[in-house]
Image (tube, rainbow, N blue to C red):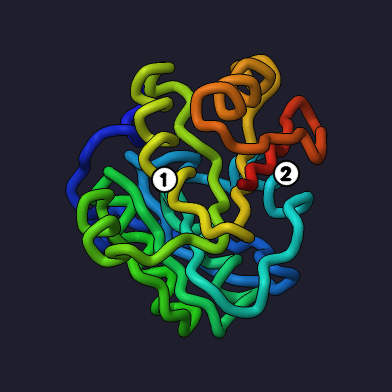
Amino acid sequence: MSDHYFSASPASAGERREVSLTLAGRPVSIETAGGVFSADRLDPGTAVLLDHAAPPPPTGTFLDLGCGWGPIALTLGLLAPGARVLAVDVNERARDLTARNAARLGLRIEVHEPESALAALGDSPLDLIWSNPPIRIGKDALHTLLSTWLPRLAPDGRAELVVAKNLGSDSLQRWIASELGLTCERTASSKGFRILTVTR
């Protein structure tokens, strides 16, 4: 199992490296490091999500669940500067990199581990969740994770999840509908990945 699902200390300056890429149609330079998900590039699944998810509303409370070094949260911040964006990850190094990258781009993004994110939100619902969920943590852990966050969607909120077809996107779609009682539709397919859109 990859390191990025476990806690890691922030990378030292010597371990961090710069990667240039395009987010929200804008060329950016970000910091990344080993020990986080897809440290050297924009992960293909995340790229599919960013290309195919419906645009975020201009305001609201948004969540990047499993933020890694921050590509989803940064994109949300760039597309909707008036929104409250929370980036959540269990990996300390990932959170450190996301915070650094947000500061680089002049974005106001709240970076949390899961428990502090729940505390920060209180009773506030989520208007949007974008996530490349950590499928490889195992079905039980994944279901617990999604059961924690998806029911927090506002009545008119939505979640956009990218899941590889060969890693169980179809069975996850059925589980979300049957076990969480939420509407879950496949709204896009590209390069072996599917976008699952979840609404109430």
Residue at (61, 28) in percent of width and height: 177
Q: Earlier in the sequence, mark 1 or mark 2?
A: 2
Instruction: Tell which of 189 and 68 is nearer to you.
Output: 189
19 relative to 8, above or below:
below
Residue at (25, 52) in percent of width and height: 113
Q: Secondary structure at mark 1?
A: helix
134 relative to 171, above or below:
below
> Which residue corresponds to mark 2?
48
Q: Residue reaching furthest left? A: 9
Q: Position of residue 120 (x, y in %)?
A: 26, 66
Instruction: Tell which of 169 and 156 is nearer to you.
Output: 156
Residue at (48, 60) in percent of width and height: 126
Q: Position of residue 66 (x, y in %)?
A: 42, 45
How far apart marks 1 and 2 lie (CA) works out to: 22 Å
Q: Viewed as shown, does residue 1 lie left or right of 187?
A: left
Count residues near mark 2 (Cα–Cα under 10 Å), then give few for <14, some for 14-19, many for 20+. Answer: many
Q: The residue under label 1 is which amino acid type?
A: Trp
150 relative to 3, above or below:
below
- Which quadrant of the figure has residue 76? bottom right
In the rendered view of the protein, which quadrant contains the N terminus? top left
Instruction: Tell which of 16 and 126 is nearer to you.
Output: 126
- Which quadrant of the figure has residue 186? top right
Are dots 1 and 2 in contact, CB under 8 Å? no
- Which quadrant of the figure has residue 169? top right
> Which residue corresponds to mark 1?
149
Q: The residue under label 2 is which amino acid type?
A: Val
Count residues near mark 1 (Cα–Cα under 10 Å), then give few for <14, some for 14-19, many for 20+. Answer: some
Q: Position of residue 175 (x, y in %)?
A: 56, 21
Q: Viewed as shown, does residue 153 lie left or right of 43?
A: left
In the rendered structure, find residue 112 and report the number of the disc placed on it: none
Residue at (26, 34) in percent of width and height: 6
